C-alpha cells in the first residue's frame, strides 16, 4: 500500500512535465517570428517613420524636395544643413523655443501643485461627495479645447493678457489639472493608508504626511503627471494660435506654421527642421523617465 500510494505524486509530476513540454511548440523560433518579431517590427516602423521623414526632409536640397520623379523621395543625395542653419540663425526660432519651454514649465508646475492637493484631498480626506468630485474632475478633461478657446479668449482680452505668454500659463492648467488629478488619485490609492495612520498617531499633521510620506512614495506618479502635462503644453496649438499674435511671443508649434507657410507655398525644409528640433526635448524627456511614466500609468489604470 505504501509503494502504491507513493507512485501517484510521481505520475502527476511526470504528467505536468509532459504537458509543459507539449506546449513548448508555442515558443519556437518560427512562432515567435510570426507572433512577436514581425508585429513588433511593423509597429516600430510605423512609429519611427514620421521622425525619419522629418529628418530626411530637413537635410534635402530644394531641388530634391520639389522633383519627386527624378529623385527618390525616401532617400537623399548630397544632404545639406541649409534648412537647419536658416532655422537657427535667420529666424527667431531660439526665442520661440524659449517661449515654449517657459510656458510649458510654468504651466506644468502650477498644474502639478494643484493636482497633488486635489488628488490627496479626494483620496485621503474622505469627505462627503468625494466620488462625485473625482468623476466631475475627470469629465472636465473630456471637454474639447475647441469649445473653450473662444470664451477664454474673451476673458484673457478683458484682463489685458492678450499676446502674452502669461495668458497660456494661466489657461493651460484648465486642461492639465483634470487628468493629472485623476492620474495622481489612482497612484495615491496604491500607497498604504496604514503609513499615514501611524504618522497621525505620532502627531504628524496632514501637511507633514503629504510632504514627508506621500510625495516621496509617489515620485513615479509625479513624474508621469509632469511628463503628460509638459508634453501637452509643448504641443498645444489652438490656444497658442488664438492668444499670441506677435512673432517674438509665439511658441514653436504656431511659429513654424505661420513663418514657413506663405499662402500655398510651404518651405518644407525649414518646416520639417523646426518640427524635428522642437521634438528633441520631448524625446530626451521620455528617454530618461519612460519607466516611471509606464509604472505610474499602470497604477492609475488599475484603479
Image: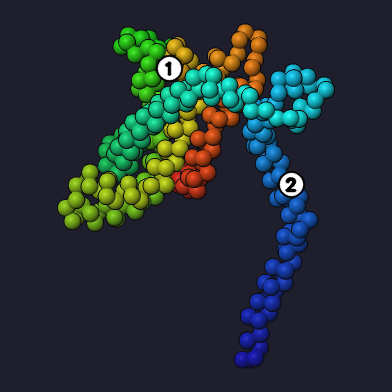
Counting residues from the start of the chain, the first of labels 1 and 2 encountered is: 2
Which residue is located at x 48 percent, y 25 percent? 94
- Left or right: 57 in relation to 87: right
The N terminus lies in quadrant: bottom right
Which residue is located at x 66 percent, y 11 percent? 265
At label 1, counting other C-alpha atoms closer than 10 Å, the crowd grade (few under 14, some 14-19, many 20 or more) is many
Using the image as rendered, state which of residue 11 and residue 162 is in the foreground. 162
For this orientation, the residue located farthest to the right is 70
- Determine the image quadrant of residue 248: top left
- Tell me if residue 27 comes above or below residue 187 in the rendering: below
- Tell me if residue 25 comes above or below residue 193 in the rendering: below
1 vs 2, front mark: 1
Which residue is located at x 75 percent, y 52 percent? 33
Q: On the image, numbered disc 1 is attached to which residue?
A: 249
Q: On the image, numbered disc 2 is attached to which residue?
A: 38
Residue 183 shows in the view: no
Render colour scheme: rainbow
The C terminus lies in quadrant: top left
Residue 47 shows in the view: yes
Residue 2 lies, in percent from the top left, at: 61, 91
How far apart are the two marked residues, 1 and 2, measured between alpha carbons? 46 Å
- Determine the image quadrant of residue 152: top left
Residue 174 lies, in percent from the top left, at: 39, 25
Regarding mark 1 in the picture, which secondary structure is present there? helix
For this orientation, the residue located farthest to the bottom is 2
Regarding mark 2 in the picture, which secondary structure is present there? helix
Residue 65 lies, in percent from the top left, at: 72, 21
- Left or right: 44 in relation to 71: left
Amino acid at each position: 500500500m505504501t509503494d502504491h500510494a507513493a507512485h501517484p505524486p510521481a505520475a502527476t509530476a511526470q504528467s505536468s512535465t509532459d504537458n509543459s513540454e507539449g506546449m513548448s511548440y508555442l515558443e519556437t523560433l518560427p512562432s515567435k517570428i510570426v507572433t512577436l518579431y514581425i508585429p513588433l517590427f511593423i509597429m516600430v516602423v510605423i512609429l519611427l517613420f514620421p521622425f525619419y521623414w522629418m529628418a530626411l526632409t530637413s537635410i534635402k536640397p530644394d531641388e530634391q524636395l520639389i522633383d519627386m520623379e527624378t529623385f527618390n523621395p525616401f532617400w537623399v543625395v548630397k544632404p545639406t544643413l541649409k534648412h537647419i542653419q536658416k532655422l537657427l540663425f535667420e529666424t527667431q526660432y531660439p526665442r520661440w523655443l524659449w517661449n515654449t519651454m517657459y510656458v510649458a514649465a510654468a504651466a506644468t508646475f502650477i498644474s502639478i501643485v494643484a493636482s497633488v492637493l486635489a488628488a490627496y484631498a479626494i483620496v485621503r480626506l474622505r469627505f462627503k461627495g468625494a466620488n462625485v468630485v473625482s468623476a466631475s474632475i475627470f469629465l472636465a478633461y473630456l471637454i474639447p479645447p475647441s469649445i473653450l478657446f473662444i470664451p477664454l479668449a474673451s476673458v484673457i482680452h478683458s484682463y489685458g493678457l492678450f499676446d502674452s505668454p502669461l495668458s497660456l500659463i494661466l489657461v493651460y492648467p484648465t486642461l492639465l489639472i483634470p487628468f493629472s488629478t485623476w492620474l495622481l488619485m489612482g497612484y495615491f490609492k496604491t500607497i498604504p493608508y496604514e503609513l499615514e495612520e501611524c504618522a497621525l498617531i505620532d502627531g504628524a499633521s496632514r501637511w507633514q504626511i503629504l510632504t514627508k510620506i506621500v510625495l516621496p512614495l509617489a515620485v513615479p506618479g509625479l513624474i508621469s503627471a509632469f511628463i503628460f502635462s509638459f508634453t501637452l503644453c509643448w504641443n498645444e496649438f489652438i490656444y497658442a494660435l488664438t492668444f499670441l499674435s506677435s512673432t517674438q511671443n509665439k511658441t514653436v508649434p504656431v511659429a513654424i506654421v505661420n513663418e514657413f507657410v506663405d499662402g500655398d507655398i510651404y518651405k518644407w525644409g525649414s518646416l520639417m527642421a523646426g518640427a524635428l528640433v522642437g521634438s528633441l526635448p520631448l524625446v530626451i524627456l521620455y528617454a530618461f523617465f519612460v519607466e516611471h511614466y509606464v509604472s505610474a500609468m499602470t497604477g492609475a489604470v488599475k484603479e
